[in-house]
Amino acid sequence: MKRTTGTCYYPEHWDKALWAEDARRMVEAGLTWVRIGEFAWSRIEPTPGDFQWEWLDDAIEVLGTAGLKVVLGTPTATPPRWVADKHPDMFAVDVDGKQRGFGSRRHYCFSHEGYQAEAARIVELFAERYGANPHVAAWQTDNEYGCHDTTISYSDAALKAFRFWLKDKYKTIDALNEAWGNVFWSMEYNDFDQIGLPNLTVTEPNPAHSLNFRRFSSDQVVRFNRIQTDIIRKHSKAPLSHNYMGRVTDFDHYKVGDDLEIATWDSYPLGFLEDRVGADVSEQRVYARQGDPDFQALHHDLYRAVGKGRWWVMEQQPGPVNWAPYNPAPLPGMVRLWSWEAFAHGAEAVCYFRWRQAPMAQEQMHAGLLRPDSADAPAMAEAKQVRDEIANAPDVAPYQAPVAMIFDYDAEFAWAVQPHGQGLSYFSLFFETYKALRKMGLSIDILRPETRDFDGYKLIVAPGLMHMDESLKQALTKANGHVMLGPRTGARDGDMVIPTPLPPAIEGLDVIVSRVESLRPDMPEPIAGGGAVTGYRELLEGSVDVVLRSKDGEAAVVSNGDVTYVAAWLNQTALRRVLAPIAEGQGLDVLDLKDGVRVRDTATERFWFNYGASETEYDGRRLEAASVIREERSE
């Protein structure tokens, strides 16, 4: 597989006289791919049935003739004003019962049947017109599902669809009442039409109700996406993709990905550091111009799993963005570093957002490869450097990392419904564990929860899987590598009921969780020998070897043979104390990397990344600030 680069372009924003010169400059910059069309509905159909295709025909021809491959986006993330006028109830409704409005983007509810029909109609017209176009080499459905908190809608359309979804799942109202435990607080229903949405209740709604609504909302995204993919496939053989986001976890990306050939995501390291990473103020200051050393890497690995091996960065930050609390410029070298880190994790393409900075509207403060006056922006030089470097780099070969982590969107839903402590989330627990492994210099594959074959992995880590079915438990206990589970493994069944026998109920691990507690952030529980429990812990009963014990005498980590159970939310020091001996015992080379230094292996290369703002050294290597070194390696 060849590594390639690309950009995102909006020909409808620019005078047609610029297009050919833009295309020439894109090719000169080494770009292969150009994404267009995803926000252009109003220019294609300014009024109902009045289609203005000629400009898009010409744009595709100009770009393709220049030698660029077009990714054509369906424009359903931005329905025009006239669509909203036709369907005034198509807007999503937030948790407080307030309807969203027109004037931005993603202004639709996934459950609205009228909008689903409008979306299907425009996608059909796109696919009919461009499905066989030789310049359209890939498709993108919609844009950034879930961005701006738009997955979960409390609209009348969602209520109607949710009731149908529940009836299809439970069949009878008695079965639903039994599964949800509705005898509690006299919440029993006599009919599915009595069931409301889990918002605006006096206190918290039934967790089973909330969890099912999150699952339903996720399924509505899958259904909406499938409507588009089914249509496009009737007319085109080009691969289909969608551009996911960072830390948007309120729908199951795996299920959406099952209907696509390529997973892509939009990587904004500096923006994410401020509003999604969860870094404290000191970390935000240290990495303000570089981004978190592990956040992008985690998503690269996650979307490789979502894409079943095929994945891209569809939007790579090239300079300051416009939407975070603070929007600094990246350090010189960071655009190159971010690009190479994506390639090191197996990306086929890295596309820079955007080609030219917009002089108008919401994103006019978002940098591009060009300034608004068409002069090169600082990122252009780094994009050209990447062009030259990938020309001399080997093809990407398939590679299985030695460490696997299981990421489960349903676990994220369950934790969101019942975090048990302020600020606790499944994603944060997973990220902290991933970060600890990365600091040890280990490369990681992320696996779906449906995975049952763990051959070749020396270490399999599955933190926080609140519901774990028996087949996964059995597959993990039979794995050849060492398995690390917890906390909250198997803590609930599929309907949010505490199971009996008590969790974690892992064969060969003679231990039960007898009680749980959440801890104030300013009251960590120290661990004997170093490290601490922060946020959450479980009290255990049973006869197993204790690996780490809190200073108050309670077991924090236990093990039995090749299974380790972590009964607490551990800080980085404690995580290393658990993970390093396991990894070394499995024959893995454990490093003690300096702050900001990271490693990633491929089948033939080893990459060294320095996220630091100053030069450093490691094992005889001189790593300049904001830099990457690529070395050849062999197994």
Image: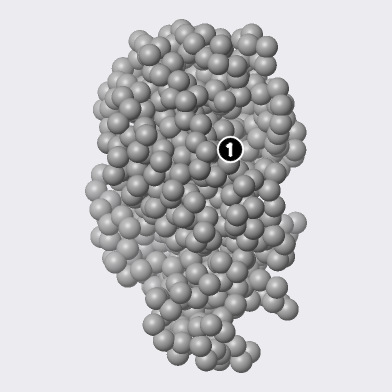
- At x 44% / y 16%, what residue is drawn? 62
595 and 625: which one is in front? 625
Q: In the picture shown, does residue 77 fall above or below 188?
A: above
Residue 90 placement (x, y as % from top left): 60, 58
Could you tell me which residue is drawn at 63 percent across and 38 percent down? 272
Residue 403: % across, % down: 37, 43
- As rendered, which of 246 and 20 lies closer to the eye? 20
Q: Residue 157's image quarter? A: bottom right
Q: For the point 68% across and 55% down, which residue is it?
A: 100
Relative horizontal placement of residue 502, taking residue 398 as reference (left or right)? right
Q: Quadrant of the C terminus?
A: top left
Residue 113 visible in this rendered orientation of the protein = yes
The picture quadrant where one finds residue 219 is bottom left
268 with respect to 628 (left or right): right
Q: Is residue 594 rendered to the left or right of residue 170?
A: right
Q: Which quarter of the figure is the N terminus placed in? A: top left
Q: Residue at x 67, y 16 (%)?
A: 372
Residue type for callout 1: Pro
Q: Is residue 278 visible?
A: no
Q: Nearer the viewer, residue 542 or 368?
A: 368
Residue 169 in the image: above or below residue 189: above
Disc 1 secondary structure class = loop
Q: 9 or 434: nearer the eye? A: 9
x, y percent for residue 471? 29, 66
* Extreme-front residue of the structure: 50
Residue 608 in the figure: left or right of residue 246: left
**Can you identify the residue that label 1 sits on?**
46
